[in-house]
Amino acid sequence: MFSELTQMPQQIETRWFSAENWLGEKGQAGKVHNGRKGSPNFPLPNGEQKTLATYDGGSGCVRRIWMTINQRTPQTYRGLRIQFFWDGADQAAIDVPVGDFFGQGLGRQIQFESALQSNPEGRSFNCCIPMPFKKGMRIELINESGIDIEMVFYDVNITINDPVDDNTLYLHALWRREHETTLKQDYEFLPLTKGRGRFLGVNVGVISNTELYYRSWWGEGECKVYLDGDETLPTLCGTGTEDYIGTAWGQGQYDNLYQGCHLADGEHMQYNFYRWHIPDPIYFYKDIRVSMHQIGYASYETMNQFLADDREIPGTNPEEGILDLKDYVENGKGNIYEREKDDWSSCAYVYLDKPTNDFPDLIPVNERCSGLDIVEESKRMDT
């Protein structure tokens, strides 16, 4: 335990990037206003882009990122876009909404703490996922929110001259959203991705379709991981959505080091949860795909409500082998059923052996933000 803290490395140096030292230069920080907090933040009008950090002097590692903004709304969390480029590549390895990248899904900020991300009081972003590079890095922030952001505060803390080799992996992230999931079609956290690497984890947002399913449980789906040539059947398969994040019998609000559900809003049926594969690494050597069933559970009371309203649950045809609605009500039982038209979004994190990927482009801002206005926007905090 003490070796990392007490052993002096060879030639590794520390650099901080912020509005007080845009280039992270040695001996050049805090120059404005005679060093008396002259440049703690910067404005980012709608449509503009700002380089948060750039380095092209060789190897290193992004160790920590902290950020906050004064206009904290669903539109800004999803409308701000953060990009990471490794080793001079023209294509971003990470191109995702800011809120989701920092573990805050559905455009909402919730206090939580995990091994790699945190939001101490529900108004800031923290990330300490190690992000090594071999030749250099660049981090961009783009405002597509439609709102002029008055104040952006941030730190990007890196080390330089870190030792790297052919087994050093680059961090990649993919954000996806399906406004309406498809019946009997698994939601993909990570579509087929080729290369060598490690699946680090995922941050997930779910808005349950209460018009179709009332307040029935949406999370009976199993996580499936297809490894190194798996096609029809995966090598890894869990037993349920809440099981995947280490809880059971439904999903309340909690946060742990490696798994948590920091948003469990039963009023609006919104959930935001995460899982880090740190103690249980998932390695792959050719390719990987990660998905989740779209399956729910209807209690006896919910089934009775469907019958009383003369409605059917999609995916309950007896020929599909799920359940016969009337039969289960007559026997006083509940059971699982196939779901559709829920709203799922996710940010998946994966280490790859190359600085670029073949991920699909980030969807337009209106598609990222739509449907998030059911929750009252956060109030502007005066700073």
Image (cartoon, rainbow, N blue to C red):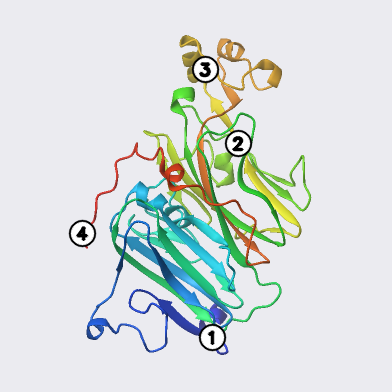
Left or right, 342 with reference to 253: right
Q: Position of residue 184 (x, y in %)?
A: 64, 30
Marked residue nearer the N-terminal end (2 or 4) = 2
User: Residue 47 or 342: which is nearer the viewer?
Assistant: 47
Q: Quadrant of the N terminus?
A: bottom right
Q: Name the residue: 51% across, 14% down.
A: 311
With respect to residue 218, does 226 lie above or below? below
Q: Name the residue: 58% across, 21% down.
A: 314
Left or right, 311 with reference to 170: left
Distance from Cα at disc 3 to Cα at disc 2: 19 Å
Q: Residues within 10 Å of mark 4 (few under 14, many from 20)?
A: few
Distance from Cα at disc 1 to Cα at disc 3: 62 Å
Marked residue nearer the N-terminal end (3 or 2) = 2
Marked residue nearer the N-terminal end (1 or 4) = 1
Amino acid found under the numbered disc labelled 2? Gly
Distance from Cα at disc 4 to Cα at disc 3: 49 Å
Amino acid found under the numbered disc labelled 4? Asp
**Discs 4/3, front:** 4
Q: Residues within 10 Å of mark 1 (few under 14, many from 20)?
A: few
- Quadrant of res 124: bottom left
Q: Which residue is mark 1?
A: 12
Mark linked to residue 221:
2
Helix, strand or loop at mark 3 = helix
Q: Residues within 10 Å of mark 2 (few under 14, many from 20)?
A: many
With respect to residue 327, does 283 lie above or below? below
Distance from Cα at disc 1 to Cα at disc 4: 39 Å
Q: Position of residue 24 (x, y in %)?
A: 42, 80
- Quadrant of res 112: bottom left
Distance from Cα at disc 1 to Cα at disc 2: 45 Å
Q: Which residue is mark 3?
A: 303
Q: Position of residue 226 (x, y in %)?
A: 72, 47
Amino acid found under the numbered disc labelled 3? Met
